[in-house]
Amino acid sequence: MKKFSILKWLVALVLIVVLAFFGFTAEVREGECAVITRFGAPRAEITDAGLYLRLPWPFEDIVKYDARRQYLESNYLETLTRDKRNIILNSYVVWEISDPLTYYNSVRSADIAEQYIRDLVTNATNGVLGGYDLTALVSLDEEKIKIDQIQAEIFTRVSETSQATYGIAIDEVSILRLSLPDVNLQSVFDQMKADRQKEIDQIVAAAERDANKIITDADARAAEIIAKGTTDAADLKAKTETEVARIYAEAQAANLELYQFLRQLDTVAGSVGAGTTLIVRTDEYPFNVLAQYGGLLDGSAGGTEADGEALAAALAKLPEAERADVTAALWALIEQAGGDAK
């Protein structure tokens, strides 16, 4: 009987300890925050995990919230841009409780918090997009797209209000989907075509500019080459004529008779050609050379004694080693002139 009485007291003591533990303490786990209330009024907020003392219910109570980051998609919103174009947007928000006491006083539940956040995103989106044209969202010109800037402005407006009013920290606000009403599709396509055509015109203009520059440079280079070639040709011709004149002068000074003879032959050879038929007098210049000297070279009749002496004197002035070559060359030239003149 005595043992049974001790057992009852032990059980009662354990129950009292357990009740006291749960009644006078509150556990906050990782990823949670809490508010301790006394008779319904908030007394303290808890942001760190641990075991905390409190008075038992109904004197004090603890309200716990999920303090982890949470993902929320906004409703589809149809709004107007600055250029009066309708667009349909869907955004997402990443949020968390940063001030449990403010959150408890203004929100108290996650469902209400999500509705408040959606309302903030809607108001901020309407306000921000009213200052931008549709091309800031949809355009082929990357410089006109301002999505990052638009999202940053929406984020600033939402985060400032939610932190101050609801104790909610907004970590990110981004546009998730963007679509257009059917009535605006054609105008958007037309705008995209215009942007693309503008880009094509710029490329064509740049190509034409480069082509004109290449043509201009090529023409200038060609003109420079032609001018240099003309100058070089003129210089070469002048030098050649000077050299020819010098050679003629030296030849005339060294052997006047041979020079005159060669000039006469050159005149005859230059006057006729293949297929030319001439009826000439062989006793007149310059064709008299054919009669005067043709027979002298092959030993047949022709020419006068003075002609022979003149030709012999001219050839005698040449070196012996060159005399035979000159005689052969003269004979070939006479035969050419005579053959062409027939």
Image (cartoon, helix red, strand yellow):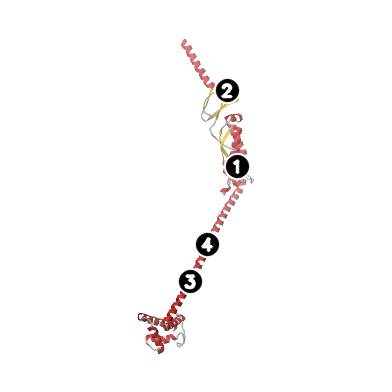
Residue 295's image quarter?
bottom left
Mark closest to the chain's N terminus, 3 or 4: 4
Q: Which residue is mark 3?
A: 235
Q: Amino acid at mark 2?
A: Glu
Disc on the earlier residue, 3 or 1: 1
Nearer to us: label 3 or label 1: 3
| Circle on res. 101 | none
Q: Which residue is mark 2?
A: 60
Quadrant, the C terminus? bottom left
For badge 1, the amino acid type reads: Ile
Instruction: Give the side of residue 258 with respect to residue 173, left or right.
Output: left
The mark that comes first in sequence, 1 or 4, is 1
Pointer 3 with pointer 4, Cβ within 8 A: no
**Element type where label 4 sits in the image:** helix
- Can residue 108 be seen at all in this image of the molecule? no
Q: Which residue carries the number 1 mark?
A: 88
Determine which residue is flagged by label 4. Answer: 217
Mark 2 and mark 3: Cα distance apart in space: 117 Å
Please state the horizontal and vertical placement of residue 100, each as a whole percent of the image: 57, 30
Q: Residues within 10 Å of mark 3 (few under 14, many from 20)?
A: few
For marks 3 and 4, give the CA distance.
27 Å
Q: Residue at x 57, y 48 (%)?
A: 143
Q: Is residue 329 left or right of residue 41?
A: left
For mark 2, give the secondary structure: strand
Graded by Cα atoms within 10 Å as few (under 14), some (14 to 19) or many (20 or more), the crowding at tag 1 reads some
Q: Are marks 1 and 2 in contact (CB under 8 Å)?
A: no
